């Protein structure tokens, strides 16, 4: 950490250091710059004794040793004017660039009951998770709550948690966050043993609206949010709005990255959310965001099923360290779906060969493609079946046969391709 009084050259030195690409220190965890990731706020800091030829680098205090990043950022120092102020993330990053500190990865917001696996297809149980780009471990299989009201969601979420699900997916627009929060409180589980994901609705685009929406979600869900994502890359349009109207009314395409995403980054750096991401972003949207963000999105939740095998998007996300989360794996009620995914011959053949259900085949296929999944059902027996996808593996031939079902058909969002959003 910087000394109690920083020299005038600090700002220039820090700016120079943070402009460089993040290096890997000791433990192998990558640390943030504009081109990289943000600091994991719950990681512990370990003081290192590294000598430097630069006198300023040696003027450090030891008060950060053993604290979390969040606690370090609550410490104060005296600036050049003798005024007290708190450290900033850039100060800690500067120490990391100088190889003066080490973050301990085992402390990075990992539930004690989750085991990290390299790929979703390698998961062995509901206690398996994949490590996101910032170190957070996210369960490979969660429980979706779409179209469940706050009153309806309580029982299903409690049942899901009882069956071993450890990720619950909700959203501002679902209007069931309060019920989800109550279900977790009544489950008997510790809050840190449940991974809560929620989304900011498309009418809340913009910095101030996103900050307000998150605080409302926090009140309903309690404490913090594990994963906060942007629900849609554009504004709200159509019913109940009049023809030609949009919400927010001041929408511009720049708002998505310079307003909404800036708020997401600040919420993350403030420790209110443990990871941030997007939903329904195309490759084009991601490329635009990566050009201007200071923190990369960690997750992209998209429609992904045998009729919509988004191979290009999946490859792009994997290349850039963005975990794809699949929804509508078993179909979607947003459009008049004329097809029954379970009836596809390759799905039926695989189900028969492995003595499992068609739903289990579809979910297993998505896992082996590299996606984490959030199936939804309110029936306990179906919830149990959806969670039982770790005892078999689809062959390369079975995977290829299901891949061949791709037609590009979209069923969610009434068939609208999000790439059509400017």
Image: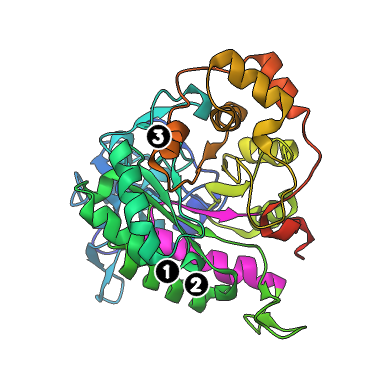
Q: Is residue 335 visible?
A: yes
Q: Nearer the viewer, residue 8 or 361?
A: 361
Residue annotated with mark 3: 384
Q: Position of residue 353 (x, y in %)?
A: 60, 13
In this image, 383 relative to 301: left or right?
A: left
Label 2 crowd bin: few (<14), some (14–19), many (20+), radius 10 Å = many
Q: Nearer the viewer, mark 3 or mark 1?
A: 3
Dot 3 surroundings within 10 Å: few (below 14), some, or many (20 or more)?
Answer: some
Mark positioned earlier in the residue sequence (3 or 2)? 2
* Secondary structure state at the residue bearing disc 3: helix
Q: What residue did someone put label 1 on?
A: 214
| Quarter of the rendering containing residue 248 | bottom right
Horizontal and vertical percent position of residue 12: 48, 61
- Helix, strand or loop for disc 2: helix
Instruction: Write the residue at 72% across / 30% down.
Output: 344
Q: Residue at the spot x=68%, y=71% of the render?
A: 254
Please report whichever mark, 3 or 1, sits nearer to the chain's N-terminal start: 1
Question: Residue at the location (59% across, 55% down)?
Answer: 279
User: Relative to residue 226, is residue 199 depicted above or below?
Assistant: below
Q: Residue at x 35, y 44 (%)?
A: 160
């Amino acid at each position: 950490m910087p000394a109690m009084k920083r020299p005038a050259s600090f700002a220039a030195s820090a700016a120079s250091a943070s402009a460089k690409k993040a290096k890997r220190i000791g433990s192998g965890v990558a640390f943030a710059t504009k081109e990289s990731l943000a600091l994991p706020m719950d990681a512990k800091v370990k003081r290192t004794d590294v000598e430097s030829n630069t006198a300023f680098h040696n003027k450090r205090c030891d008060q950060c040793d053993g604290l979390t990043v969040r606690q370090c950022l609550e410490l104060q120092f005296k600036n050049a004017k003798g005024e007290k102020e708190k450290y900033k993330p850039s100060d800690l990053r500067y120490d990391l660039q100088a190889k003066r500190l080490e973050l301990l990865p085992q402390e990075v917001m990992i539930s004690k009951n989750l085991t990290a696996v390299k790929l979703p297809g390698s998961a062995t149980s509901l206690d398996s998770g994949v490590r996101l780009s910032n170190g957070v471990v996210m369960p490979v299989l969660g429980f979706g709550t779409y179209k469940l009201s706050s009153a309806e969601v309580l029982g299903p979420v409690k049942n899901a948690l009882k069956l071993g699900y450890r990720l619950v997916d909700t959203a501002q627009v679902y209007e069931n966050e309060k019920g989800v929060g109550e279900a977790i409180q009544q489950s008997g589980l510790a809050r840190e043993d449940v991974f809560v994901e929620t989304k900011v609705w498309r009418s809340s685009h913009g910095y101030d609206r996103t900050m307000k929406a998150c605080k409302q979600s926090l009140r309903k869900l309690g404490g913090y949010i594990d994963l906060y994502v942007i629900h849609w890359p554009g504004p709200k349009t159509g019913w109940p709005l009049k023809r030609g109207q949009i919400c927010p009314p001041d929408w511009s395409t720049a708002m998505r990255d310079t307003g909404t995403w800036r708020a997401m980054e600040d919420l993350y750096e403030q420790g209110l959310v443990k990871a941030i991401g997007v939903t329904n972003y195309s490759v084009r949207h991601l490329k635009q965001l990566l050009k201007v963000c200071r923190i990369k999105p960690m997750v992209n939740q998209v429609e992904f099923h045998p009729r919509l095998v988004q191979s290009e998007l999946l490859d792009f996300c994997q290349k850039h360290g963005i975990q794809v989360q699949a929804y509508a794996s078993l179909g979607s009620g947003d459009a008049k779906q004329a097809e029954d995914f379970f009836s596809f011959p390759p799905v039926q053949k695989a189900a028969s060969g492995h003595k499992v259900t068609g739903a289990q085949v579809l979910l297993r296929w998505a896992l082996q493609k590299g996606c984490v999944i959030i199936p939804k059902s309110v029936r306990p027996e179906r919830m149990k079946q959806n969670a039982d996808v770790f005892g078999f593996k689809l062959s390369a031939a079975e995977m290829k046969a299901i891949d061949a079902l791709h037609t590009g058909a979209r069923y969610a969002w009434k068939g609208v391709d999000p790439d059509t959003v400017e």
